[in-house]
Amino acid sequence: MTREIQVTFDCADPAALAAFWAEVLGYRIQAPPAGFDTWDAALEAMGIPEERRNDASAVIDPDGRGPRIFFQRVPEGKTAKNRVHLDVRSAPGQAGDERMASHEAEAARLVALGATRVRRVEPEPPLGAGHIVMLDPEGNEFCLD
């Protein structure tokens, strides 16, 4: 039996990080519960004080194939390198110069959204296809792979 997974990010600003990752992945912010037009209206009805309304956010795959990604506010900042990271497949089916050009174009788009480019790793055939290491706006590592 397979299991669904959710990827969770600890962060300082769940709404901002959710918006960033929605753009990266082509996801969308999860809609509020049925009967509510906005999250603010839903949280108001639940009695959540205004200062707690950015404690969490989530993005979902509009096609329902990928995992839900959840963002939760935590008091501490990031202190070390991630032991687990996301590889964003920005050049599926491509190889060599074409693949790296696709990664470069995506890296430029993500930098404009607030990401930081860390380094480019050149292809090393037969097993190393090349990738670009990035940081999201809160410093979480991910790769364009």
Image: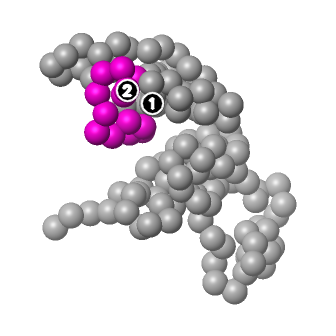
Left or right: 8, with 5 as reference point: right
* 94 within the magenta span: yes
* 78 within the magenta span: no
- Residue behind mark 1: 102
Q: Which structural element holds mark 2?
A: helix
Instruction: Give the image location of residue 106, x and y in percent.
Output: 53, 32
Tell me whether the residue at label 1 lies in contact with that at label 2, contact meaning CB atoms closer than 8 angstroms: yes
Q: How many marks?
A: 2
Instruction: Give the image location of residue 7, x and y in percent.
Output: 44, 50
Q: Which structural element holds mark 1?
A: helix
Query: Marks 1 and 2, how far apart in space?
Result: 6 Å
Left or right: 11, with 119 as reference point: right
Residue at 39% x, 58% y is 66
> Would residue 128 be seen by someone viewing this image from the given angle?
yes
Q: Quadrant of the C terminus?
A: top left
Image height check: is 93 above or below 80? below
- Residue behind mark 2: 98
Start-end of magenta stretch: 87-100
Q: Quadrant of the N terminus?
A: bottom left
Left or right: 6, with 38 as reference point: left
